[in-house]
Image (tube, grey):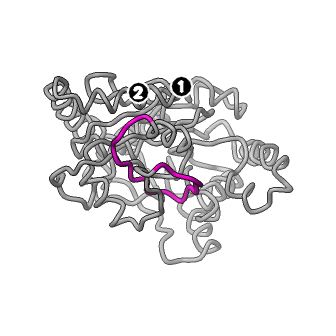
Amino acid sequence: MIRIATSIWSDEAVWRSTKLIDRRNIGLARYLWRIWKGAGQCDVLILNGALGWPDRYCDLLAALVVKLRVRRPWVVLTDCTWEMGSRALARKMPMLAWLWPRLSRFMIARLDHRKAIYCVLSSDEKKNFGKNWRVDPSRIHFTPFCNTLFDVGDELPSEDYVFSGGNSLRDYPLLIEAFEKVPNSLRIASSFKAMDLPANVVCRPLPHQAYMEELRRSGIVVVPLQPSQRSAGQQTYLNAMALGKLTIINDVMGVRDYVEHGVTGLIVDSTPQAIADAIIWAGDENSHAAVDNIRSAGRIAAREKFGLANYLASIKEVAQGVAR
């Protein structure tokens, strides 16, 4: 019997055989002490590699703590969508922007060891992660992400506006320029700040409930992404697809692992004209049947192939595989 401990909590059936090391409602020092003790009682420890500055990088620190043990378990770090450096720290201390890439590589080198496993969210990252972070490619696994519609009902009647949201690696200037070419209304839910918006564009941050309400009532969802060394936006476009929205994403790293162009969504070039053309096509009455087919196929794919249980099962499969 392989003993698996994790800091990731879930009620999914596939996850019930894991032992939770709970970080909620306790301080960082106490959590790291729990990690130290729990690491001595398991064969594999699964940690969340996506926890950044707001969470005090607690699971990366946990991985460092585990490395200090003489007899350490396998450590599986999930959601390792890492960039060289920290955008949060660069915003807080821009005068030290040159330091963060060096510091991030130094820290990953400190926590790395032969029993450290890294799970990434795209096949492209599986190829370049080892080079970027100087990690043995055999210890890198692609675990497809999931939609996160855990507490949200089905789609509501659609209204005649386009929705876009999120902050991570978004290219909103690209999207805003596209809407200078189309008459549709665009509602952006983001902390992005822009001057001189077109009359048909609104951009402001929204609390979670309002964000989800606006997503659910939209007719089309566009996720404009910046090119990067990591993937981004999966949660947003998978949620949109799961709600049956026609979802348009520009062609950057990771997108084709989740979206089949013309079947479950639309993948377009990273130009304002390409985005505008896709929206105009979707609004043409001759495209309605094709749009309905894409919406339906996207909904099925996001809910049945990219659900939470699928994501957790892929992580657990990696954990069991390395332990064997």
Upstream in sequence: badge 2 or badge 1? 1
Q: Residues within 10 Å of mark 2 (few under 14, many from 20)?
A: some
Percent coordinates x, y for residue 167 in the rendering: 52, 52
On the rendered structure, is 260 left or right of 117? left
At 76% across and 42% down in the image, what residue appears?
105
Q: Which mark is residue 124?
A: 1
The residue that disc 2 covers is 257
Please tell me in which quadrant of the rendered image residue 304 appears.
Answer: top left
Amino acid type at mark 2: Asp
Q: Which mark is residue 154?
A: none
Residue 189 in magenta stretch: yes
Amino acid type at mark 1: Asp
On the rendered structure, is 186 left or right of 52? left
135 to 221, vertically: above or below: above
Dots 2, 1 in contact, CB < 8 A: yes
Magenta stretch: give its range.
Answer: 181-198
Q: Residues within 10 Å of mark 1 (few under 14, many from 20)?
A: some
Q: Is residue 74 visible?
A: no
The secondary structure that dominates the magenta segment is loop
Q: 138 or 145: which is nearer to us?
A: 145
Percent coordinates x, y for residue 209 in the rendering: 33, 66
